[in-house]
Image (cartoon, helix red, strand yellow):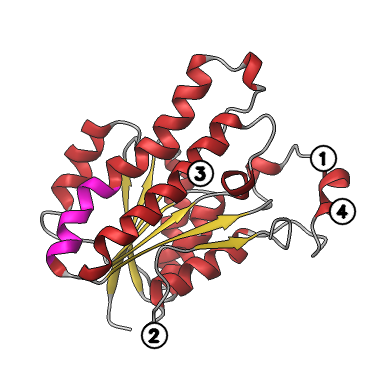
Amino acid sequence: MDKKLALVIGGSRGIGRAIALKLSESGFDIWLNYRSNHEAAKSVKLEIEKQKGSCELIPFDISDYDAVSDILGAKVKTQVPDVVVFNAGIARDNLMVFMTKDEWDSVIRTNLDGFYNVINNVLFGMISKKHGRIIAVSSTSGETGQAGQVNYSASKAGLIGAAKSLAREVGKRKIFVNVVSPGVIDTEMTTDLPKDKILPLIPLNRYGTPEDVASVVNFLACEKNMYIQGQVISVNGGLST
């Protein structure tokens, strides 16, 4: 594969880290976005460089449109990513009856507004090139809903709707837009979940790994014979079908 550029949003830990490493293995230069965990981001950069890849760290808060525009908007004037993976997301779980305005707003700002903030800044360049792939990382919670996650589920369901609509807008410009929807993945976010109650619900009888998700993202980013557009690919071990 000719050398190409992938922007990984939320790439310093967990699923994002695995995606960045996998895309680097596939020959992409990496722009690695993260918000504030500099040590984790530097660790990913070092791993990529050890495998002879290239990684540039680009810290900014995706929920802040002005920050995204100032930093990312300036960079895409000189180089437009071939692939954008929108992986960033936060959870502020609570029952709706007790959910605070901040718990609602912070999740929507990051998980959904963040998608707009990032894609709005890169899309014109992709349209001009008539080339690009956008991969949004949603969640099984966005497909089926989950008690205690009304804010998170709403944001991830909104991400699916946004990606499906965008796919219809830009398909004629040879820009592919799809969604990868992980189930229960073994990361820091799932450390405190009760495995004894969850595993019986998963036909494969194990949590997924970040690498399970990264392999699907990598396929959507690299595959030449591509006819997948506006689709949600679930990576959940059969938890939801």
User: Which residue occupies 39% across, 79% down?
Assistant: 226
Q: Amino acid at mark 4?
A: Pro
Q: Residues within 10 Å of mark 1 (few under 14, many from 20)?
A: few
Q: Secondary structure at mark 2?
A: loop
Task: Give the vertical position of 185 relative to 193 (above or below).
Answer: below
Query: Which residues fall within the magenta stretch?
Result: 119-128
User: Does the image show residue 10?
Assistant: no
Q: Judging from the image, what secondary structure is the residue with disc 4 in? A: helix
Q: Secondary structure at mark 1?
A: loop
Q: Could you give the CA–CA distance between mark 4 and mark 2, rounded to whole angstroms? A: 37 Å
Name which of mark 4 and mark 2 comes first in the sequence: 4
In this rendering, the answer to whether 103 lies above or below 203 is above
Which circle's residue, 3 or 1, is located before the other in the chain? 3
Residue ID at (62%, 50%): 140
Please provide percent x and percent y for residue 193.
76, 39
* Amino acid type for the residue under numbered disc 2: Asn
Q: Which residue is mark 1?
A: 194
User: Distance between the Cα atoms at labels 1 and 4?
Assistant: 11 Å
